[in-house]
Image (spheres, rainbow, N blue to C red):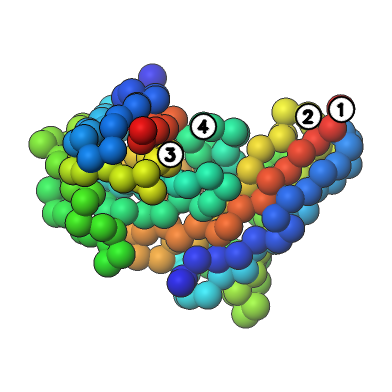
Amino acid sequence: SQQGEEDPQALSIQEGENATMNCSYKTSINNLQWYRQNSGRGLVHLILIRSNEREKHSGRLRVTLDTSKKSSSLLITASRAADTASYFCATDNTDKLIFGTGTRLQVFP
Amino acid sequence: DAMVIQNPRYQVTQFGKPVTLSCSQTLNHNVMYWYQQKSSQAPKLLFHYYDKDFNNEADTPDNFQSRRPNTSFCFLDIRSPGLGDAAMYLCASRGLADNQETQYFGPGTRLLVL
């Protein structure tokens, strides 16, 4: 399977703490994207990092990409209860997204 | 607002009874996708259209078919649903974000097979 893997599978933190999720993938990529999914809902695009970029910021989100290790991380700073969701990385190669296994984040108030 | 719309949000069907799920997009994107997502799993691509060109994933069962009559609409037909086909079905279209193409997802249709 070409599917990427994410760790941890589940993460529970308190509001205000930072949350870090990691993603590993297997193939070469054009870019890597992170999506958020609330329970029972569709996927919402969060951030995209190109294969020639190493780090990107968007609000409270920070994404890193290491193509030599085929890995990426998503950092959510100063987490809020509303950040509770599943987070998926997805690699983009040939017009198709291949999703990682996801991290379920629970932020307690 | 421009978006990807899926109807219905919840669909109940009987074992073996054909069912059709609908997706429309007002984004005028030329690429559309159908994904299947089972509980606590990652979305799995079933097939995609580039304009009218249909691209089936190698491991998509023959039970799953798709139609795209025009740019805006795309349908997923499940000819004989089995219990294992109960899942969330996500539709997406592909367009520009941050100067690079990415996918915009609909809210999904949750299919229950009785």
- Which corner quadrant of the image does residue A72 belong to? bottom right
Question: What residue do we see at 50% from left, 57% from top?
Answer: A99
Q: Nearer the viewer, residue A49 or A107?
A: A107
Cβ atoms at labels 1 and 2 below 8 Å apart: yes
Q: CA distance from mark 4 to mark 3?
A: 9 Å
Q: CA distance from mark 3 to mark 1?
A: 29 Å
Q: CA distance from mark 1 to mark 4?
A: 22 Å
Q: Which residue is mark 1?
A: A109
The circle drawn on residue A81 is 2
Q: Is residue A104 visible?
A: yes
- Chain letter for the residue marked with disc 2 in the picture: A
Do marks 1 and 4 share a chain? yes
Cβ atoms at labels 2 and 4 below 8 Å apart: no
Do marks 2 and 3 share a chain? no
Q: CA distance from mark 2 to mark 3?
A: 25 Å
Q: Position of residue A18 (x, y in %)?
A: 84, 45
Which of discs 3 and 1 lies nearer the camera? The answer is 3
Q: Which residue is mark 4?
A: A41
B6 lies above or below B86: above
Q: Which residue is mark 3?
A: B88
Three-letter code, disc 2: Ala
Position of the N terminus of chain B, as image quadrant, is top left
Question: What residue do we see at 50% from left, 39% from top?
Answer: A43
Image check: A67 left or right of B47?
A: right
Image check: B74 left or right of A71?
A: left
Q: Nearer the viewer, residue B1 or B45?
A: B45
Q: Residues within 10 Å of mark 4 (few under 14, many from 20)?
A: some
Image check: A39 left or right of B62?
A: right
Which of discs 4 and 3 lies nearer the camera? The answer is 3
| First along the sequence among labels 1 and 2 | 2
Q: Position of residue B64 (x, y in %)?
A: 23, 49
Q: Nearer the viewer, residue B70 or A62?
A: B70
